[in-house]
Amino acid sequence: MKTYLNFISNEWVASSGASPIAVSNPATEAIMGRVTAASTAQALQACDAAATAQIAWRKLSSAERGVHLHKLANAIEARKTAIGQALALESGKSLEDATFEAVYAAEITRYHAEWARRVEGEIIPSDSARENLMLHREPMGVVACLIPFNYPVYTLMRKVAPALITGNTVVVRPSNNTPCSAFEIAQAVLDAGLPPGVVNIMTMGHDEAQAMCIHPKVAMITLTGGVGAGRRVLEYSKTNIAKSSLELGGKTPAIVAPDTDLDRAATDIVRSKTTNCGQLCTAVERVYVQRAVHDTLVGKLKALMSARKFGDRAEDASRMGPLINAESRQAIHDMVGRAVAAGAKLECGGMMPAGRGYFYPPTLLTNVQQSAEIVQEEVFGPVLCVLPYDSFDDALAMASDHQFGLASVLYTENYRHVMQASNEIEAGELYINRTPADPYQGYHAGWKRSGLGGDDGKHGMLEFTQTRLVVMNYSS
């Protein structure tokens, strides 16, 4: 069993008194590692170190920062086995999937490194003849990065890489459920030779996280998490009027038209719902299918979900893995129970497995109402609801009649419906004849309670900048 220390200014720092955090394998419930919990003083020390480092880091040319990021990407890839092993044990993922996530984290780091010569300002015409308006893009300063448990390696670099290339430094708080892989990335930061204080990574409790986020030098807070966590970050941001970038809950609708390949749609939807045990903010959670093919699609979904086996992916990588902890499993099971009590039909799943590990079977519900809790609230597990629709306008209305608006899916061969959905769906992303995958050159941003700002691509990179307008008058 490995014990990890906090990473502050390129040094491994022991706890100053707080009890270590035990990290368990959700597939076996066995303790797989321990991490030290940062004290409030250490969290503030890391912010001070980041603020000091940012003075020199922002003065580097963006091309020089790009060289550093390429070295970091190479170091992450060189450590992909160690990162993958830690991630697999703390998350219940297969070693193959966990290692691939490390490689993908290296790739998004390289992608943002390539923005080094493309962080552009603007020249804007002035009303005065002998005057230019020049809009500069500048770094925010110190960025607090709050990382979730579901894809903790990829999401960490999804935030850190664009922050660094634009001249910011970072303090990172990984999830206490999956912190070990973050410290393996910290070793990659050392291997890559990044200057001290540019990247700081610490585990901590909520009080210490609050102290970090309201530190006077923290200019931006970026979070991937739930709506409740997003509200807390908005409270933190009031102290410094810090910028907030929030990727919050999702409840992805999939509209399935009768003209599509139902076998393909069913296969895609079940894969989306059972990947990482449904712990993905863009996983399909509700299906709206044309009434004429409702029963046919439900039969196909039921067969596929019933056949999907779950278990320890270290023993069989083809299985669906566990939920992250006992609390998540109980909350999901309780939600399914309330849905059934309210009249939903349980087509498959919906039981609490015996034995070790936080497993939950793929669960399919029909005869649910649009207003039901199971349709309105994010489940974040392998539970799928199916509702019929009559007209395409009805389907769009139900898909958009929701508090969330992160991703959406449409299966159809009707280009008119594709164009209508492209113009009318209330979501930040629309996937046609496929399920979500967050291309990192796109822009992953939610509507409504799904968040503020966004990640990925040019626009995600620019989230980590602020502007300065220079009014240059050259009249005599």
Image (spheres, rainbow, N blue to C red):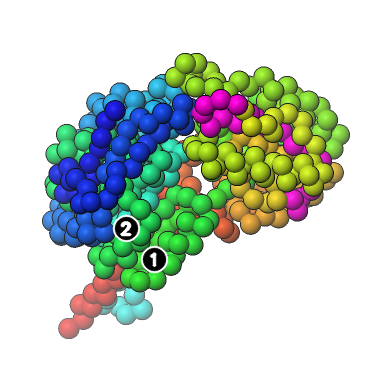
Q: Nearer the viewer, mark 2 or mark 1?
A: 2
Vertical comparison of 181 with 47: above or below: above
Q: Secondary structure at mark 1?
A: helix
Instruction: Determine which quarter of the picture holds residue 131.
Output: bottom left
Left/right of residue 80 with respect to residue 357 in the rendered view: left
Q: Residue furthest bottom?
A: 476
Vertical comparison of 190 with 370: above or below: above
Q: Main secondary structure of the magenta part?
A: loop
Return the mark for residue 421. Answer: none
The residue that appears at 43% across and 67% down in the rendered structure is 235
* Image quarter (top left, top right, bottom left or bottom right) of the N terminus: top left
Determine crowd level at label 2: few under 14, some 14-19, many 20+ residues with C-alpha closer than 10 A. some
The residue that appears at 38% across and 56% down in the rendered structure is 206
Camera sees residue 341 = yes
Q: Tell me which segment is drawn in magenta.
A: 354-372
Q: Amino acid at mark 2?
A: Glu
Count numbered badges in the picture. 2
Residue 356 painted magenta: yes
Residue under label 1, please give it: 236
Left/right of residue 29 with respect to residue 32 in the rendered view: right
